[in-house]
């Protein structure tokens, strides 16, 4: 038996993943109305931008924006398989992926997960979910701009990274963390196709990476330098 497959984590994740992010906006007129007023060009600009995402994500403060349940299981499996003890996450949201990763740390014997989220309402909900899951002691949530919160006071050796925040910042966050990645460290990027410069970097072996797309929306990369 593992933390991930037993209570309180397993039933909590089942409930939280049941809050399908794709259905929630349709029940929130303020969000759907805003999104529907945007042109396709504006939608693409917001999703790819390194600067114009704050208003969009603030409007999504009540939407989970979580990884899929399959990706959550993958995160747990990968963190267990490499016996990760140091994990960094960009984009906490409600903490679903955080719980998956922290469960792996618990089952690996302990460790530290640093996660960054700039929306205060989501930080509050994530803290509650982590406490309910019984893994809050393994997690440090840093509230604010990840380019600041993840710029210092990290482990000297990082085993695994999840990128699931503002897509246009993926390469910037990677630049912050790459010097601390241990050889063989794994980096998973959700919706990486929204940041073409990131995909270009990790798919070029000359840059020190081996990378492969997973399912339709995740890029899984290994740091080999």
Image (cartoon, rainbow, N blue to C red):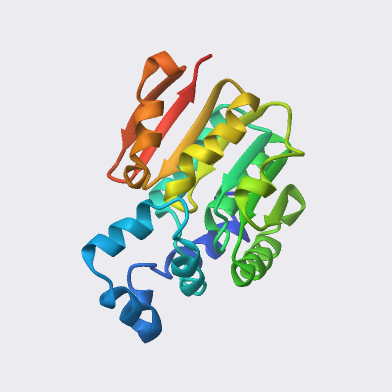
Between 65 and 96, the residue placed more toward the observer is 65
Residue 21: quarter of image: bottom left
Total labels drawn = 0
Residue at far left of view:
40
The image quarter containing residue 141 is bottom right
The reply to whether residue 9 is in sight is: yes
Classify residue 12 as left or right of residue 102: left
**Residue visible at 33% across and 78% down in the picture:** 32
> Compared to 180, does 150 lie above or below?
below
Q: Is residue 51 above or below residue 103?
A: below
Residue 56 position within the rendered picture, expressed as x and y whole percent measured from the top left:
44, 68
- Name the residue located 60 percent from the left edge and 33 percent from the top edge: 177
What residue appears at the point 44 percent right and 62 percent down from the top-left corner?
A: 65
Which residue ends up furthest to the bottom in the rendered image?
29
* Residue 113, horizontal then vertical, whole percent: 68, 44
The N terminus is located in which quarter?
A: top right
Residue 166 at x, y percent in the picture: 47, 53
- Residue for point 47% across, 42% down: 170
Any part of residue 1 in sight: no
Q: Is residue 108 left or right of residue 56?
A: right
| Nearest the eye: 45 or 24 | 45
Q: Is residue 60 above or below residue 223?
A: below
Residue nearest the viewer, comparing 37 with 81: 37
The quadrant in which residue 178 appears is top right
The location of residue 175, given as percent across then percent down, is: 55, 32
Vertical position of residue 35 compared to residue 148: above or below: below
């Amino acid at each position: 038996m593992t933390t991930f497959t037993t209570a309180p984590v397993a039933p909590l994740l089942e409930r939280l993943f049941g809050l399908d992010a794709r259905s929630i906006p349709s029940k929130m007129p303020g969000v759907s109305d805003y999104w529907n007023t945007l042109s396709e060009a504006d939608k693409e600009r917001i999703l790819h931008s390194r600067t114009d995402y704050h208003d969009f994500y603030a409007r999504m403060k009540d939407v989970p924006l979580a990884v899929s349940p399959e990706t959550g299981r993958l995160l747990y499996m990968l963190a267990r398989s490499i016996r990760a003890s140091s994990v960094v996450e960009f984009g906490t949201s409600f903490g679903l992926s955080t719980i998956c990763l922290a469960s792996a740390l618990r089952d690996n014997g302990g460790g530290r997960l640093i996660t960054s989220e700039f929306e205060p309402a989501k930080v509050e909900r994530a803290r509650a979910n982590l406490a309910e899951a019984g893994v809050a002691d393994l997690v440090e949530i840093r509230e604010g701009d990840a380019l600041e919160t993840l710029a210092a006071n990290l482990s000297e050796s990082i085993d695994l990274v999840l990128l699931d925040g503002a897509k246009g910042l993926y390469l910037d966050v990677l630049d912050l963390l790459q010097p601390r990645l241990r050889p063989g460290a794994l980096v998973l990027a959700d919706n990486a196709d929204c940041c073409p410069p990131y995909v270009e970097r990790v798919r070029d072996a000359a840059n020190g990476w081996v990378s492969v797309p997973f399912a339709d929306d995740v890029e899984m990369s290994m740091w080999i330098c």
